[in-house]
Image (cartoon, rainbow, N blue to C red):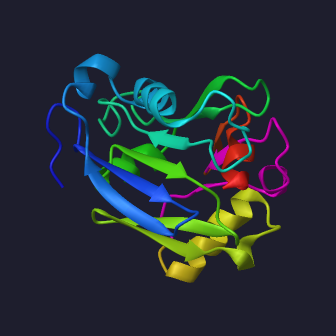
């Protein structure tokens, strides 16, 4: 994995309704115009979410994006941004989490993930070495967000795996639910509810 100018240059596009994954190059010019993270989230939502979309429906898109500093050995450079139409407001919303999930996403080969559609069953995304897999998450449904992370680490046999998860609030689409990234949370605008709706 090569990082040039703070970017890997790849976005993973996941359509959960179809069960399909595509890896695409970052649009030319986006690095300077939108500067990753929230900027990319806002642009992708502007392009791909219709104005009348239900925040918890299949037309909403959840964007998980890093920025150009994510992964550097600098204070505050561990951020990852979650963006979507907020179930709390009905308008664009975003939230950030610190820690190691963002840097690990970038080191796995992606600047961002774009999650579209809705799965019929609980799933999670496994991201590794430039690829994204959709995996069954039925056994984790109903667990607390931090418990889910420990269970996934146990099941894949790697205690160093970084996980962004939800718990019962997200699963039940509570409009202010957060996304857990270890002990750091993306706690604004209900991004956990959007993740749970997917």
Report the residue that reaches farthest toward the top.
33
**Location of the C terminus (image quadrant):** bottom right
Q: Is residue 72 above or below residue 169?
A: above
Q: How many marks?
A: 0
Query: Can you see residue 8?
Result: yes
The secondary structure that most of the magenta stretch takes on is loop
Q: Residue at x 67, y 45 (%)?
A: 179
- Relative placement, left or right, of 38 versus 167 is left
Where does residue 141 sit, x and y in percent of width and height? 77, 69
Q: Quadrant of residue 1?
A: bottom left
Q: Quadrant of residue 112?
A: top left
Query: Can you see residue 160?
Result: no
Where does residue 177 sit, x and y in percent of width and height? 78, 41
Q: Is residue 142 above or below residue 5?
A: below
164 inside magenta stretch: yes
Where does residue 140 sit, x and y in percent of width and height? 72, 72
Look at the image and give the residue range highlighted in magenta. Answer: 159-181
Q: Residue at x 35, y 35 (%)?
A: 70
Q: Residue at x 64, y 65 (%)?
A: 119
- Relative placement, left or right, of 121 versus 171 is left
107 inside magenta stretch: no
Which one is in front, 16 or 64?
A: 16
Q: Residue at x 45, y 31 (%)?
A: 47
Q: Is residue 62 above or below residue 168?
A: above
Where does residue 166 sit, x and y in percent of width and height? 71, 54
Which one is in front, 40 or 74?
A: 40
- Relative placement, left or right, of 69 versus 123 is left
Which one is in front, 100 or 140?
A: 140
């Amino acid at each position: 994995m090569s990082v040039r100018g703070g970017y890997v240059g790849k976005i993973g596009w996941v359509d959960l309704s179809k069960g399909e994954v595509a890896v695409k190059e970052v649009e030319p010019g986006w690095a300077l115009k939108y500067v990753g993270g929230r900027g990319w989230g806002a642009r992708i939502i502007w392009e791909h979410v219709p104005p009348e979309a239900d925040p918890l429906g299949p037309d909403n898109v959840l964007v998980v994006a890093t920025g150009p500093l994510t992964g550097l050995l600098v204070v505050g450079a561990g951020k990852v941004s979650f963006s979507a139409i907020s179930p709390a407001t009905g308008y664009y919303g975003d939230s950030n989490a610190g820690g190691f999930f963002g840097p690990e996403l970038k080191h796995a080969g992606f600047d961002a993930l774009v999650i579209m559609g809705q799965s019929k069953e609980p799933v999670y995304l496994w991201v590794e070495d430039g690829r994204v897999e959709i995996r069954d998450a039925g056994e984790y449904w109903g667990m607390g967000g931090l418990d889910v992370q420990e269970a996934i680490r146990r099941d894949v046999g790697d205690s160093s795996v970084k996980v962004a998860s939800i718990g019962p609030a997200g699963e039940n689409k509570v409009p202010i639910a957060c996304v857990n990234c270890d002990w750091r949370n993306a706690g604004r605008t209900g991004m956990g509810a959007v993740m749970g709706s997917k």
